[in-house]
Amino acid sequence: MPTLNLQVNGRPHRVDAESDTPLLHVLRNQIGLTGAKLGCGLEQCGACAVLVDGESRLSCVAAASDFEGKDIVTVEGLAQDGALNKVQRAFIAETAAQCGYCTPGMVIAVTGLFQRGPSPSDADVQEALAGHLCRCGSHARILAAIDRLRREG
Amino acid sequence: MAENPSLTKNPGLDSWIAITADGTVRVRMGKVDIGQKISSAVSRLAAEELDVAPARIVMIRPDTIDGPDEGMTSGSNSMEESGNAVRLASATARAALLAKAASVLRVDIDELDIDDGTITARSTNASTTYWDLQGDQPFGIPIDHAARIKPAEERTLVGKATTPLDLEDIVTGRHVFVNDMTMDGMVHARPVRPPHANARLESLDEAVLAKLADDGFTVVRDGSFLAIASADEFAVIKAARVLFNAASWTREPGLDNRDIFEQLTTNERMSMPVIDGVPVLDTPVPPPLEVPAGAKASHAARYERAYIMHGSIGPSAGLAVSRDDGLEIWTHSQGIYLLRTSLAELLELPPETLRIHHRPGSGCYGHNGADDAAVDAAFVARAMPGVPVLLKWTREDEHAWEPYSPAMVMELSGAIDADGAITAWSHESHSDTHVLRPRPGVAGLGPSRLMPARYLENPPAVIPPPPNMTHHGGIHRNLEPLYRIPEPRLVKHLVRNLPHRTSALRTLGAYANVYALESFLDELAAAAGEDAVELRLRHMDDPRARACIEAVASRIGPLDGAPDGYGRGLGFAQYKNAKAYAAVAVELTVDETDRVRLKRAVIAGDAGQIVDPNGFTAQLEGGFIQAASWTILEAVTHDPDGITSRDWESYPIIGFDNISEIETILLDQPDAPFLGAGEAVCGPTGAAIANAVARATGVRPRRLPLTPENLRAAALSA
Ligand code: FES
Ligand code: FES
């Protein structure tokens, strides 16, 4: 089995994985980071999103080997020294989750969005959240969290 | 107050509350948190009645070992049952602790003050604490049904906005779902299902099986039940495909592919009148409505709703390990006791040898695949003694094998007289069962409702479900209008031999019934030249219902006054005519591709006393968005070879591109009992959207979902 070198949440990891194993499975089962969720495995729901070099990417299909040499951040890596990032704080302030299954993917997508600038347009928001499904109907609260972040600038 | 089944079954205080020596209050409930944040609300109630800081309350996850058995988490009963039980338990505990303190401190009870679990005598300033008095000791007393509950003006926590307990864990990825669990030596497993529900396994290619065994996979087969396991999850996913292709299946009979609405009105059925919300057996269905003499207008219409699915974002999963002394299971089932009884019966094991723990799952909104996945995991675990087995359904499994919410046909007719009074009303609902939970009953009934059991070599006989005869039960939930209408003619048809397995989805029959009833009110109003809101208010005596309708009507503006190209619509219901009230008004447009685009929504909700305004708002918004998705987009599809809506492309749900502004108006009743709120808003949402589409397009949509295809068909037949 090939050995991969992955940089996850600021730390190097050496893992053995078949060349077609999706990043998501390596993160969850080999590195033990289960924050990114398996929702569909078909790139249709957004539950598995992680940041790759600062951009939100789906991890359930693309092979882990494609991510060598890149900076991968999962939802577990967003808080710094125990302090939540501003997106996580905004999600809490607006109660932007119900069951929470979609939430890690949403938090990653919104974090990626705000890394591109403090005042995303509505079109930017739609683009960032397209493909992110929530069955509990927390959409309105997530949009409220985004509005809060825009106000905070 | 009516009898609380949670308390009747679990009368002892120690089933609910324990005080620990290290300063916490452990609260147990039998209801599970399914994203409705009930544990947050219940923990507030406990902190309030016990006079302790909310942070001291530790909510214990339900299991079948020593928690209270509260049956199912469903039907918006959680707050009424668990909430009231915990409230009374907390008040009982507080009184017991005060009595103990009074004797320890040698003062009268009314000289004592409590602050965060510290009890102080005003006269002497001497104090003690809950933890000293009761730490790690059982109370050994029953819950006092007459314990004093704080009246509204004494409350400091209940009614204030709160942050749900586990939100921080959720946004940091620490919240562990069943799907995320891991154990030493654990293997991953996937079920390998037949191509469709009627198909059966004929044979497996032995060479492929040998190769899989060589590669370290465990294949479990019993009749047509098939699953595969190994340590590497992705390898299992791939091998499951190999195994499917190595199987030959008998595919006859295929799924009945005739028009489902035709089947609903022509198949064999049990028909019964519904009187005062309750079906009556062995009574002839009353003859069809006759238009009363002097009617100013009369009207008849038929409405249809396709099969829809729960569609949890996280596929169902179960973790099981089989040991000499029994089977231990971790599941997101909403009914761990029912699951235990039925699985024990199936496996012929004493129920106490099954230990079932509830762990979080993706939101399920009813009876989804949770129980079945737990059973799948148990089957695999029994073939691999001592090895923990985490079995997950794939996305395809979830879409194709969860129990759906049944398709429905609603036929309405009515008449209105010259004074604008509704003088005749008929509503017949045709559908399959809405409740097929693994509830034990006659021998084999519970096991037959565990889907994987149906594929075993020796399956339990499948017993056709009896009609649900409870007040506002399944098909007839909200069949009875809350409006003042003389002797409505209400008929329930439980239809047999339909193509899909069905069970409980949020609101059961209420969503489709309210969609039909509130659509028909608009149609009847139009036929008589009446204003739709006026007509509703004229027939509504309940002031809380009127307040909801009036609140949304005034916020949305005149129903016929929408800007050009837009339509407004309104819908109302009191869930089960007994629970929370909700009115919804929307403004929307139908775009050039015939897609419904929501623009604005106003929701008014009255769930009695508001325990947690944040939670209540989230329930209303979430219910609105989910029901909007059902209404606009959702239909399970199939052909003779199986389910064809097998992923999010073939079964789309609402996304961020169609989320409107939502204004929620919470109508608080501080002195009224609290009511479940999770389901009230769904029916009114369907009705409001359909009514708005009718105003926007001039064409009445009578078939859900309101997809471009269905809207075009409605326009052609109009
Ligand atoms: S799990 Fe990756 S998009 Fe659904
Ligand atoms: S919060 Fe449950 S799926 Fe989004």
Image (tube, coloured by chain):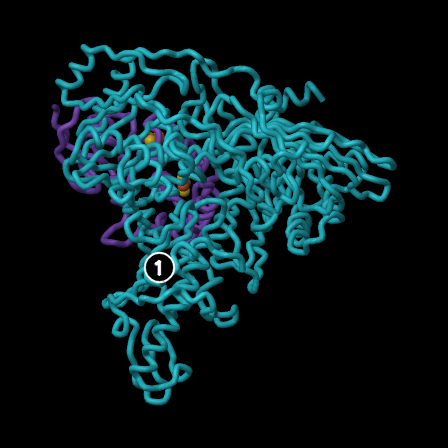
Chain colours: A purple, B cyan
Residue lying at 67% horizontally and 27% vertically, measured from the top left: B302
Q: Nearer the viewer, residue B120 or B666?
A: B120
* B572, above or below B700, in the image: below
- The image quadrant where one finds the C terminus of chain B is top right
* B591, above or below A139, in the image: above
Q: Is residue B565 visible?
A: no
Q: Quadrant of residue B268?
A: top right
* B274, above or below B32, in the image: above
Quadrant position of ligand 2: top left
Q: Nearer the viewer, residue A44 or B386?
A: B386
Q: Is residue B644 visible?
A: yes
Residue lying at 69% horizontally and 38% vertically, measured from the top left: B563
Image x and y of residue B174, in percent: 27, 46
**Lateral position of residue B295 relative to residue B685, left or right:** right
Q: Quadrant of residue B344?
A: top left
Image x and y of residue A76, in percent: 26, 44
**Lateral position of residue B52 relative to residue B221, left or right:** right
Image x and y of residue B652, in percent: 47, 27
Residue lying at 42% horizontally and 52% vertically, measured from the top left: B38
Mark 1 is on which residue type?
Answer: Trp
**Lateral position of residue B186 relative to residue B171, left or right:** left
Q: Quadrant of residue B349?
A: top left
Q: Nearer the viewer, residue A142 or B244?
A: B244
Image x and y of residue B559, in percent: 71, 41
Residue assigned mark 1? B16
Q: Nearer the viewer, residue B368 or B281?
A: B281
